[in-house]
Image (spheres, grey):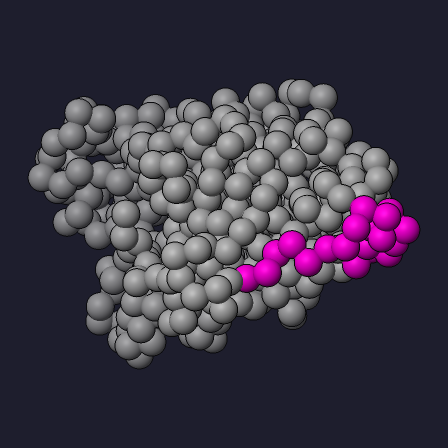
């Protein structure tokens, strides 16, 4: 038995007997089989963090059981603090795969799916872009199509408005497209916006640098959605650098928020809570601090700490209520969720072993999302199906999941894929259920299509 789970089985049995519960009754409360729980109690099976949290809730252990089986952190190589002087190459293949890599000896950061690739352009963090000279120049992507400084200055306002419109279109496209396919264009657009800024007057330069930072941050999000955390962190760092160059010091706090999310997905809960808390308690605008409080809440939920999680959600709601967004500026964070705190409340309640309450929140917020927000609606819908499956409503979960499987293969989200795999494991406990058997072929196909991509190193 792993060291982290030592003592869980005997402690579970002790608390179950003290509560006067049979194995049958506890199995019904946590929706696991009696035989599985028996093997966990006797040490024949190791408990998952999720099972530990749910038993903790069912037995009112106040986090004591959950603490015995913490999330297993996945080690990550921290991206460099500065990228000055680094040269990176984006290589794109006609089959659709792409690869973003350093030419100075660093490991490559995948922009998309793996495969044989052909070089496209080289990007110097110092500001130059040039075609890769090792291949046909006809394959290169022109990035530096801007006129003299005077032209950029004269059309500064129009240029900023047009660039913001491009960003809005990318975010809309990101709701319906495979993120790996968007990454090459996003990388190019980030560079183009930075170059436009460097050739503009002071005021236009600042605004365009901040917008370039937003492009870089969104590139990081799409990299994360494609399943590459390393590239996500690299682009998050790049976004912070661009924002600071544009005299916007607040995006550094949002960089902490993004890092907290990656840490949560990797299972490093303590690090995530620390990063989120630092961003929440700083001097950033209310929206960034509110988003940080949400991630802190999710971290506390993964630790089985109900009161700390709910307190952080209350903080998030109070901070986001103070937000006074500029209608001319892109929204930081989710832009298609009417009440993001309620959505996070549902997810936290799921982590805390209260799936039925979680489903109530998730159903309400999913229904309120706009129809064009395919990625957001699919992610929330799959989590809703997961909550219903975990609460024993297997047929309803299958009904909810069926129309979402096709969408999941289109948007190809790493987070949606992870939730599909969680749902499939729960449904797999009910092999004789007719709804599960009927859904199985389509679910298997969706799991295959959304499986983590492997990228050559």
Q: Nearer the viewer, residue 382 or 224?
A: 224
Q: Nearer the viewer, residue 274 or 111?
A: 111
Q: Is residue 209 left or right of residue 254?
A: right
**Residue 111 counted in the magenta span:** no
Image location of residue 336, percent across then percent down: 67, 57
**Residue located at (59% from left, 60% from top):** 142
Quarter location, residue 391: bottom left
Image location of residue 392, percent across then percent down: 37, 58
**Residue located at (29% from left, 70% from top):** 444
**Residue 146 counted in the magenta span:** yes
Q: Is residue 30 left or right of residue 231?
A: left
Q: Nearer the viewer, residue 190 or 48?
A: 190
Q: Which residues are magenta?
A: 141-162
**Residue located at (46% from left, 59% from top):** 120
**Residue located at (19% from left, 43% from top):** 37
Give the farthest residue toward the right.
154
Q: Is residue 181 left or right of residue 245?
A: left
Q: Nearer the viewer, residue 197 or 299?
A: 197
Q: How many marks?
A: 0
Image location of residue 217, percent across then percent down: 59, 44
In the picture shown, does residue 299 fall above or below 447?
Answer: above
Q: Quadrant of the N terminus?
A: top left
Q: Is residue 210 left or right of residue 253?
A: right
In the picture shown, does residue 96 fall above or below 123?
Answer: below
Quarter location, residue 46: top left
Q: Is residue 160 visible?
A: no
Q: Is residue 96 visible?
A: yes
Image location of residue 291, percent across then percent down: 63, 37
Quarter location, residue 363: bottom right
């Amino acid at each position: 038995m792993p060291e982290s789970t030592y003592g869980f089985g005997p402690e579970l049995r002790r608390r179950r007997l003290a509560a006067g519960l049979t194995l049958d009754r506890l199995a019904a409360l946590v929706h696991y089989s009696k035989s599985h729980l028996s093997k966990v109690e006797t040490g024949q099976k190791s408990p998952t963090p999720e099972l530990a949290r749910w038993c903790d809730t069912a037995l009112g252990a106040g986090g004591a059981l959950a603490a015995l089986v913490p999330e297993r952190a996945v080690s990550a190589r921290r991206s460099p603090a500065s990228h000055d002087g680094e040269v990176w190459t984006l290589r794109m293949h006609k089959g659709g795969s792409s690869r973003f890599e350093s030419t100075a000896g660093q490991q490559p950061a995948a922009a998309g799916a793996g495969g044989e690739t052909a070089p496209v352009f080289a990007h110097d963090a110092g500001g130059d872009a040039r075609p890769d000279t090792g291949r046909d120049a006809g394959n290169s992507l022109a990035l530096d199509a801007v006129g003299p400084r005077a032209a950029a200055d004269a059309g500064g306002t129009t240029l900023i408005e047009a660039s913001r419109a491009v960003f809005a279109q990318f975010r809309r496209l990101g709701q319906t497209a495979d993120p790996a396919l968007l990454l090459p264009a996003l990388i190019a657009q980030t560079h183009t916006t930075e170059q436009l800024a460097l050739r503009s007057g002071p005021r236009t330069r600042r605004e365009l640098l901040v917008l370039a930072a937003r492009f870089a941050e969104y590139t990081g999000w799409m990299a994360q959605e494609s399943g590459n955390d390393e590239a996500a962190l690299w682009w998050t760092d790049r976004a912070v650098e661009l924002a600071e160059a544009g005299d916007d010091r607040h995006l550094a706090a949002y960089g902490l928020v993004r890092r907290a999310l990656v840490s949560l997905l990797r299972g490093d809960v303590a690090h995530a809570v620390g990063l989120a808390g630092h961003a929440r308690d700083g001097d950033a605008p209310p929206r960034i601090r509110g988003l940080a409080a949400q991630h802190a809440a999710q971290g506390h939920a993964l630790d089985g700490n109900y009161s700390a999680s709910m307190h952080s959600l209350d903080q998030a709601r109070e901070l986001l209520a103070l937000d006074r967004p500029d209608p001319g500026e892109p929204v930081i964070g989710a832009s298609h969720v009417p009440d993001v705190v309620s959505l996070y409340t549902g997810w936290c309640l799921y982590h805390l072993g209260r799936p039925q309450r979680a489903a109530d929140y998730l159903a309400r917020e999913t229904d309120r999302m706009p129809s064009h927000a395919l990625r957001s609606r699919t992610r929330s819908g799959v989590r809703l199906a997961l909550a219903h499956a975990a609460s024993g409503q297997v047929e309803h979960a299958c009904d909810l999941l069926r129309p979402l499987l096709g969408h999941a293969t289109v948007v190809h989200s790493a987070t949606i894929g992870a939730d599909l795999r969680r749902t499939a494991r729960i449904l797999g406990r009910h092999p004789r259920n007719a709804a599960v058997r009927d859904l199985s072929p389509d679910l298997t196909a969706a799991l295959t299509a959304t499986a983590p991509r492997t990228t050559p190193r």
